[in-house]
Image (cartoon, helix red, strand yellow):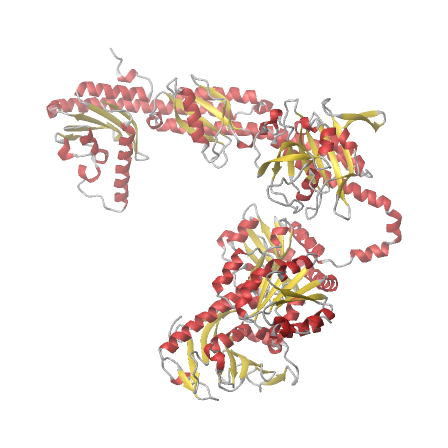
Amino acid sequence: MRPPVETASGLSAVLRGVVADIQQASGADIVSLFLYNESTRTYYAPFAIGQPQEGLLGSLADMHEQMARYLDDGGHGKVPDELSIQHYGSTVWLTVTRQNLVAMDAPAQIDSTFIRRYQVQSTIGLPLLAADRLLGLVYLNYRNRANAPDAKRLAALEAQAAAAASSVQVALTVAERAALEGLGRLTALLTTPVGAARADVKEVRRLLSIALADMLMASDLDGAAVYQLGAHRGRLELVTAHAAVAAPVRIGRPDPSTPWEDALKEAFGAASAEAELHPVATYALGGAPEPTGYLVLVSRDRLATVRRAPATDVLLKAGAELIGGALGGQRLVADLEHSNRLLGALGDMTTSMLRPGSSRHEVIDAVVGHLTDAAVPEFDFHFATLYLLDERPDQTMVVRMAAGAATASAIDATERSKGKGARARVPRWALDEDRQLAGDDVLVHVARRWQAVIVGPLPAGGVIDRADVFTGAIPDASTWIEVPVVRSDGTTVATVAACMIGEGEGADDRRAGSGVPPFTLAGEVFEAGRHAELIRIFMPFGSDHDRRATGVLEVGYHRSYERRPDWGQVEALRAAAAQVAAAVETARLYEDARRHAEQLELSADVSQAIASSIDLDQTLRLVAHNLVRLVHASLCQIALYEEDREGWFGAAASDQEDLWRRQHGERSEPSFFFDVLDRVEPVVIEDSSASDQVSPSYARAFGVRSLMALPLIADGQPIGAVVLAERSQLRAFTKEEVQRAQGLALQAAVAIKNARLHALAEEERHLQKDFVLVGFGQWGQKAYQHLLTLKQFFNFRTHVVEHDGPGARERIGAGEEEIRRRGDAFYWDAPGAPAHDQLQRELESSSYVITYIATPAATHLPMLSLYYDLSDVVLIEKPLGAPPEAYRDFLDRAPGGVEIVAADHYYFKLEVRLLQLLLTEERTLRDFLDSVDEIRVEILEKQPLAGAAADIGVIADLIPHAFAIISLLTPIDRIELDAEAPLLVGRHEGFSGRRESYARMNARFAYHGRSVRLVIDVGKGVDDAKWIKLVGERRAAGRSPSYKFDFGKGEAIDGTQATVRAAVRRIREPGVPDNAHLNMLRHVIEKRHPAVGILSIREAIRANQRVRDLEALAVDLLAKDQWTSYALGTRPAFEAVAAPAVKP
């Protein structure tokens, strides 16, 4: 006879007994039992007789869904007062009411999927209650109503359910006690310090094996295993296991995107399937984001995952944390020992290298000895060679010095004396100094590209096996290639496998053509040194990454031995390379000091003068590196503002300088750089991701999390900004740190400004510029005369291009000969002889090319596309001649690095230039700008609108000039048109054209935190008037303060003082010519970054788009007859016309 339920061991055994006893007593066709956790409101531990076990998981999910729906409705007050089975199902009803469920007609009373699937006719539900605690539910299902219990049998079943509840409670208590005791044993076992044994792998495995046995005993599971991630997280390696089957020793994953948990379950499940053991739980060890390993548990019960007692779950999770801690502790100690050993080796290497007075040869001889030290696993190479490289004037690279050491007898080496009777084996190929290298030699590639390279041996049997080259995974970006072994006569000897690590830093354009390997191996050295049997690592070293590497380390193994390079050795070599670079540079300085001691002493005054010389790049880098150290920041970046304060560009950085120097920003893009400029005070941003002042792309590119930006102020004006950033964590820069950095920033600003002025002067003095003038029509000939004038002040050469069309040569006449006579070049552009190709050859050696497109407007974009690749700066005079979308498409596709200046000649009128000067230099006007309430601009001409211009209209003709003026105060895209009357248009009497002859634009824009009204009047057929007027807030008494700049009269009227008469000051004397065109050409020749503000192509596109929007408004107004007529010589009376306005 089966023993009573109470004597069965384990929760699962007790529940199976309960189900069997109730089935026997009730005669039910299907008996199912589910335990209930009152604290979490969840069901677990499903057992049943009479239905498939696999279906229990679906039943459990349905029960959880019903309870979740009930709890959600309860939280919103939607649960009915009289709860019935139909509301949330029988399970919720039993759980909430804790009453017996008697459904003799189950299809009508319950009507669930379960009832229909198993053709149940009657259902009895009994709660398992222990005092006032609900432990679970029992369901009795009958396919024949006649077999359902009557009242007497139901009472007996209730008593049996009560007894079963007591047994379940006892089993749960036993499980809790077993889990608690097991956890105590695990804690004592895995947290007690055991001295140095804790770092021993065997001891840790023994402890973990005992821990697994304790966990299995307390949890009633059938097996467990612990895995840890191997080197570089490429595979799982077995630490210990406690199971009836052999656990896989190593587990990999072919697809890196597959979670390790899935790969572990699949591999372990396949190994244990024959023993009918199934993985039921997997726990990450050491933390979820970057676990150190995994604990996997198996059971013969497929449903063990949902049948565990809550206490057992707690035990397993806590046990996994303890096991993870033990593994992590062992790995930490092992890593510390490894790091200490490596640091000790690097320290010994540094000590031997940095001996005062050592020469470079003595340094490199010491290095190769340490790189073949068997006492340090990372440096126990069979051979090591170190090359110091030099470059001849023709850029041919040579091995200036070399040193080597070999420990393995298989390496082709020779005995050399080391002094004091000591002898050393040196690889034969390390004896060849002053060896010229081919332009594509591996040493040249590694040095120029700053890229580590691994080169394999000659393939065995002609088949390349990467495993024969490197052990383990390569976590960095890597590229496997095949490289040829080439003799000096061009003969290819063999092909070997190679792996390039990383992307490389420098540029190497020596290789031409697609599919050509990036480097080759020297055939003579390969054959003479028996390199066919060697696995080699090439590592660059040097102190200046902006130039080529100083030298290259070459280390490796003979393939007849089992040892192969691994990633740990690559990283150790990188660390050693940094030490070698410092030592070699120090030795070089010692050599220079010894060699020039007398000269330095005699020329002390000269040295002092050189030390005080001004170099912009050096000054910028010095400031960046000192500021970053001053406040212990992660990064320092310096940005300099454009001269018109409408843009900034990256100038120097303590890190990622190449990327930073490619950055550029405009005022139309929100940025903290302009906050610093406008406020002229530091800006501190603790969390860059939460600030709209920091571009997300900037934060991602440089990893910036917190920053402070400081203004660089020289002569009272900000010339740039310094950014001190933190990358590793959020940081709140203190007030003291801000003050300390700002003090140095003020000193740095003066040095930068002086260096900048010096650099500009030096650049102008030494930089040979080339000016390409495309088009020699009316504007081209006028431009050429201006260029002749500018040649008196600037150093450039002129190239004139003219299309060789019908009649072109006759039209040019003697002009071509005159150009050549002046020493300039002239090119005819014909299909058979394109001028572009001729210029490409001619300008190949040029350092700076300016291209001015002076062809008809319709050809501007095609000419820009054609000459873009030849130019550093391209000048296009408006109109652009193509839709904004066409220009945007070109800019999105074109490579960066070329500045495109889209100039409106009005911007370069003398009066506009003087206005800009006053806005920046006139203190009274600058102060007045802070209180400006309205700005009015008028560009009016007496001449009526006639001829071809009548079909263009004054908006397209004159509004761009007004935008050029107003751009001195705000970017055009920040102008918001008035909501009620954005545009008013008029036509003068006798006007026969289709467009407007007068227009008034009403708008507003934000300026220094204020909303400023903007009114622009443009028109023809009225009085001549060209001026801008700034009007301040109206005062309680007297007139409104104002400042008017009259372009036509050349005078400024200062009415900012309301109590005194307005002061009239003449700013341009009569007779002074207005050479706007000349000024425009001078700007692009003189300025280092000429595409500033409205002159930049993207700002010009935005302005052009705004003009097109206004033209569309005007067309709509004219079509609706909503325009005002006016007599010649008068202005339209817009104020007297109440016509409705059209919104854009």
Residue 568 percent across, percent down from the top left? 62, 32
Residue 657 percent across, percent down from the top left? 63, 51
The number of numbered badges drawn on the structure is: 0
Foreground residue among 661 and 1060: 661
Seen in the picture, residue 921 relative to 332 is either above or below; the reply is below
| Quadrant where the N terminus is found in the figure | top left
| Quadrant where the C terminus is found in the figure | bottom left
Residue 1120 percent across, percent down from the top left? 35, 77
Q: Residue at x 53, y 80 (%)?
A: 1029
> Quick check: 423 left or right of 242?
right
> Quick check: 1120 left or right of 629?
left
Foreground residue among 490 and 958: 490
> Quick check: 96 left or right of 588?
left
> Which of the 4 quarters of the picture holds residue 410?
top right
> Which of the 4 quarters of the picture holds residue 406?
top right
> Quick check: 763 left or right of 287?
right
Asked whether residue 874 is in view, the answer is: yes
Asked whether residue 934 is in view, the answer is: no
Q: Residue at x 61, y 48 (%)?
A: 634
Residue 1117 percent across, percent down from the top left? 38, 76
Seen in the picture, residue 143 relative to 793 is either above or below; the reply is above
Q: Residue furthest top?
A: 1
